[in-house]
Every structure is written in C-alpha cells, then in structure tokens.
Image (cartoon, grey):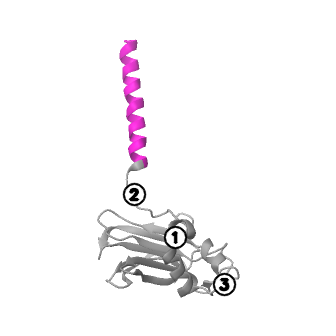
Amino acid sequence: MKLKASIIASGIAIALLLTVGVYQVWPRSATNDWQPLANAVPLELMMQIGREHLMPDADEQLSQMEIMRLWQSGQTRTLYLIDSRTADLSTNENPLCGALGCAFFAYVPIEGGFQSVLNLYLDPHLPPDIALIETGEMLHNDMPKLIIHQLEGNQLIQMHLVLNNEQYEVIETRYLPAE
C-alpha cells in the first residue's frame, strides 16, 4: 500500500514539473513584455526612432524608452511597439508627452530598414487592471490586431486597430463603462 502511494506521489510530482516546464517554454504573446529600447531593438531601428522623433542630442531619452516586440505564430515579421515615456508621467520630463498623452510608435522591418506603421498619442492614465495596449489573437495583413484602451470621462473607449498594408487604422470603437 505504501509503495503504491509513493508511486502515485512521484507520478504527480513528475507531472507537475513537466507542466511547469512546458508552460515556461510555450510560445506566448508578448503583450506585457515591455523592455528597455536599447536592450531589445536593432541599432538601426533605434537610430531611426531618434532621427524621426527626438532632438539630435537626445540619446539618453532614447535609451530610457521601452519597447514591446510583438510576434505571433504565423507572423513573418516582428512588430516593434515603442512607448516614448522616459520618466514618470511628468510631462516636463517626457519630451514626447503633452496634453493629448504620450507618443507611441510601431515599426516593422522592410528591405533596407524599418517602416513606421503607427504613430499616435495615448493617455496612459488608466485603472490598474486595464491594459493600455493589448494584442488580438488573429493576424491581419501579417500583423496582430492592436486593442487600445482610453478613458473619456466615465467611459472606457476600446479601439481595435489593424494594419492596412501601410498603417494601423481603427476598424472598430467600443464604448464600455469605466469601473
């Protein structure tokens, strides 16, 4: 009887270890995987972002921005989503933040460089349980759908954006109650 119980316990322990191991290596969307820009982006893209969006002497600000690399199964190119905030939400310290929010950009690799596919301002002030940007599960024109949340008064706005070959565009807007 004791032998049977220890065999069952060993089997459960092995199954648990296998489950944890599979979970750790299973491919997942990088929806909440923001990383420092300097650590996760090709140098060529980092230089392009600096040229297109910052003053020439703003290298320190560029290195403080964050990036999320979005890639899903079936996608042939990575989508690089950049959050331009370089400090806390004080607009004085963030050169790309203002009355409308903070700048967010997205790029995809193309032959000879990177193409800008998103350039918008988002207000990052949301309830803690609501993500500013999420990805949908389906691909459109080889890129993930982006789901963006914004507050407007007491309503939560949920915008669904897809790539139209050149730029992300809003295809659906939902107004949800803010809780």
Residue at the image position 70 percent from the left and 82 percent from the top: 92
78 relative to 100, above or below:
above
Q: Earlier in the sequence, mark 2 or mark 1?
A: 2
165 relative to 6, above or below:
below
Q: Name the foreground residue: 127 vs 77.
A: 77
29 relative to 11, above or below:
below
Looking at the rendered structure, the secondary structure element under dot 1 is strand
Q: Main secondary structure of the magenta part?
A: helix
Q: Which residue is mark 1?
A: 67
Residue at the image position 62 percent from the left and 72 percent from the top: 64
Looking at the rendered structure, the secondary structure element under dot 3 is loop
Residue at the image position 56 percent from the left and 82 percent from the top: 50
Q: Disc 2 vs disc 1: which is toward the camera?
A: 1
Q: Disc 3 vs disc 2: which is toward the camera?
A: 3
- Residue contact between numbered discs 3 and 1, judged by CB atoms under 8 Å: no
Distance of label 2 from label 1 (alpha carbons)? 17 Å
